[in-house]
Image: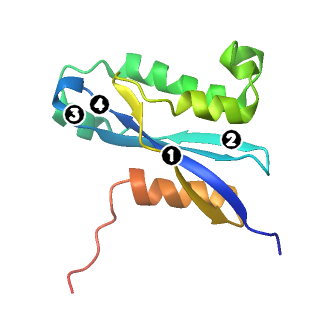
Amino acid sequence: MRAHDTYDYAVIRVVPRVEREEFVNVGIILSCERAGFLEARIELDEARLRMLDPTLDIESLRRHLDTIPAICRGGESAAPIGLLPSRARFHWLTAKRSSIIQTSPVHMGRCGDLPATLDHLMDRMVRPPKATAPR
């Protein structure tokens, strides 16, 4: 059995109208320095975003969000940020900003399976809750 790794994560948020401070969680960035793991997953719920701003340019937003996983992967295609060490890329991605794409504060945890944890965080923080039968 693999030892548990300590990881950091942040929730990626879209704030369609910054002045209103309303947001929709659209993804997770997960980093584990010890395992050399840095990955982001993004899932847009266009209907929820349109409720906050019917005029939002979804295609432009999608193009900007697509840069986040590219920066996580690193390399020349994400240069110059993609050439930084993974920890520096994580901190660059999670820095505070006042734009329509923002991140939550960084949280930490421990797990034995980083990809499964990323999926669990997507279920818990991004994807709409699944309907359950009333009790």
Which residue is the extreme one toward the right? Answer: 1
Q: Residue at image x 50%, y 46%?
A: 106
Q: Are marks 2 and 1 in contact (CB under 8 Å)?
A: no
Q: Is residue 131 shown left or right of residue 64?
A: left
* Quadrant (top left, top right, bottom left, bottom right) of the N terminus: bottom right
Identify the coloring.
rainbow
Whether residue 17 is visible, yes or no, is: no
Q: Residue at image x 64%, y 41%?
A: 39
Distance in Å between CA atoms under marks 1 and 3: 19 Å
Q: Residue at image x 39%, y 22%?
A: 61
Q: Earlier in the sequence, mark 2 or mark 1?
A: 2
Secondary structure category for the residue under label 2: strand
Tag 3: amino acid: Glu
Q: Which residue is mark 1?
A: 106
Q: Is residue 38 shown left or right of residue 117?
A: right
Q: Which residue is mark 2?
A: 38
Above or below, 80 against 91 in this view is: above
